[in-house]
């Protein structure tokens, strides 16, 4: 079935106590976006009916590659090699970065978040400006725009894909499928929160289609409090996901360099002295002779040195050690 629907890779994520899911599958496919609902989703839904603890996301491979290059933390953290449970013969989606590339990517991630937040702050400034001007309907509209921009930022690195709509209620439902708790959200079971959310929803439609909209200063202040908590949550989750990325890159760096250290020969000159022990002077002179003969043989043009021997270093070091074994001082006049 995987081959029939063109799946390239599947990554398995495990949720934390702050997530709303236990297990999540990230499915990378070669299909185009419009084929998801027709081909992939019905098949996955029928399978996962038996496993309610599992959720899933489906992404086009080209989109995933593009978002990784742009520094999207969702793909960098959740489509990592350590989470890979299925793949075709192609290379892994997440490339291995060297130290310089990792630093550049980290700066790209931070700059992208800073640009997104600056747009959100612009809407927030508009909200405060219209509030001071007592233009409450326009102020409510700017609160709506600030919330919407904030959800789009959050969805980018929490879901990997932004939900295209203007309904704060839909954005909230979408995000809470992944995050179990988020300050600044509206509790549907609460009458006061439900009313505030309705006012927020109506602020957008009223500004575009009608002029029949009323909201009080007290309600504006309540929305402002919600917005402040929401912005703090966005910053928290960004810093959390960034720390996950940096930890993954540090762990990968440690593993890569430890493997290189195991493969590369270590050139030490003093460990030989500690390991050589002689019962008498005759045995020491025999060892010196053997070492010199070995170096002489290795230096012959028609003979290859033993595997792992470096002519420009090991032979010189061995000769120096052999000379130290000779009783030169004792035999000098």
Image (cartoon, rainbow, N blue to C red):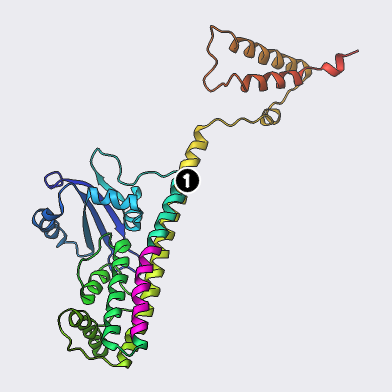
Relative placement, left or right, of 54 versus 19 is left
- Could you tell me which quadrant the C terminus lies in? top right
Q: Quadrant of residue 276?
A: top right
- Residue at image point 37% right, 88% down: 132
Q: Residue at x 30, y 90 (%)?
A: 219
Residue 87 drawn in magenta = no
Direction left: furthest residue? 38
Q: What is the quadrant of residue 146 in the picture?
A: bottom left
Q: State the predominant SS element of the stretch in magenta.
A: helix
Q: Residue furthest front?
A: 133
The reply to whether residue 183 is visible in this rendering is no
In the image, residue 25 sits, relative to residue 131, either above or below, namely above
- Residue 129 lies in the magenta-colored region: yes
Query: Is 323 displayed left or right of 257 in the figure?
Result: right
Q: Residue at x 17, y 89 (%)?
A: 212
Q: Position of residue 24 (x, y in %)?
A: 26, 59
Q: Which residue is mark 1?
A: 100
Residue 260 shows up from this direction: yes
Q: Is residue 70 above or below residue 20?
A: above
Instruction: Find residue 130 and report its horizontal and vertical position in percent.
Output: 33, 84
Q: Closest to the observer: 176 or 99?
A: 99
Total label count? 1
Residue 56 locus on image (x, y percent): 22, 59
| Helix, strand or loop at mark 1 | helix
For the point 71% across and 18% down, the residue is 322
**Is 262 rendered above or below residue 225?**
above
Given residues 68 and 18, the one toward you in this image is 68
- Segment tinted magenta in the rendering: 114-130
**Which sits in the foreground, 153 or 187?**
153
Image position, residue 231 (x, y; %)? 37, 74
Please name whichever residue, 186 or 3, is drawn nearer the observer in this view of the structure. 186
Mark 1 is surrounded, within 10 Å at the Cα level, by few (under 14), some (14 to 19) or many (20 or more) other residues, namely: few
């Amino acid at each position: 079935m995987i081959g029939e629907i063109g799946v390239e890779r599947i990554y398995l994520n495990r949720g934390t106590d702050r997530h709303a899911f236990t297990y999540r599958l990230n499915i990378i496919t070669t299909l185009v976006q419009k084929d998801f609902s027709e081909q992939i989703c019905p098949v996955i839904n029928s399978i996962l009916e038996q496993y309610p603890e599992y959720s899933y996301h489906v992404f086009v491979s080209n989109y995933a590659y593009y978002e990784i290059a742009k520094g999207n933390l969702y793909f960098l953290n959740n489509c990592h090699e350590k989470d890979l449970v299925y793949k075709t013969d192609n290379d892994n989606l997440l490339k291995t970065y060297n130290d310089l590339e990792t630093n550049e990517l980290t700066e790209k991630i931070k700059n992208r978040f800073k640009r997104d937040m600056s747009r959100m702050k612009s809407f927030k400034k508009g909200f405060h400006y219209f509030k001071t001007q007592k233009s409450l309907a326009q102020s409510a509209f700017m609160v709506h725009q600030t919330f919407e921009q904030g959800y789009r930022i959050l969805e980018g690195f929490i879901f990997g894909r932004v939900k295209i709509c203007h309904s704060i209620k839909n954005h909230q439902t979408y995000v809470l499928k992944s995050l179990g708790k988020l300050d600044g959200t509206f509790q549907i079971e609460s009458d006061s929160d439900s009313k505030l959310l309705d006012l927020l929803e109506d602020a957008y439609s009223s500004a575009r289609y009608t002029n029949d909209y009323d909201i009080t200063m007290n309600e504006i202040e309540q929305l402002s409090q919600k917005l402040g908590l929401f912005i703090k949550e966005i910053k928290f989750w960004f810093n959390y996901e960034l720390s996950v990325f940096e930890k993954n890159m540090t762990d990968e760096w440690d593993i890569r360099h430890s493997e290189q250290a195991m493969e590369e020969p270590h050139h030490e000159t003093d460990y030989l002295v500690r390991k050589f022990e002689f019962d008498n002077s005759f045995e020491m002179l025999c060892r010196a002779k053997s070492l010199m003969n070995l170096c002489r043989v290795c230096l012959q043009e028609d003979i290859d040195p033993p595997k792992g021997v470096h002519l420009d270093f090991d032979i010189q070091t061995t000769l120096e050690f052999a000379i130290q074994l000779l009783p030169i001082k004792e035999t000098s006049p």
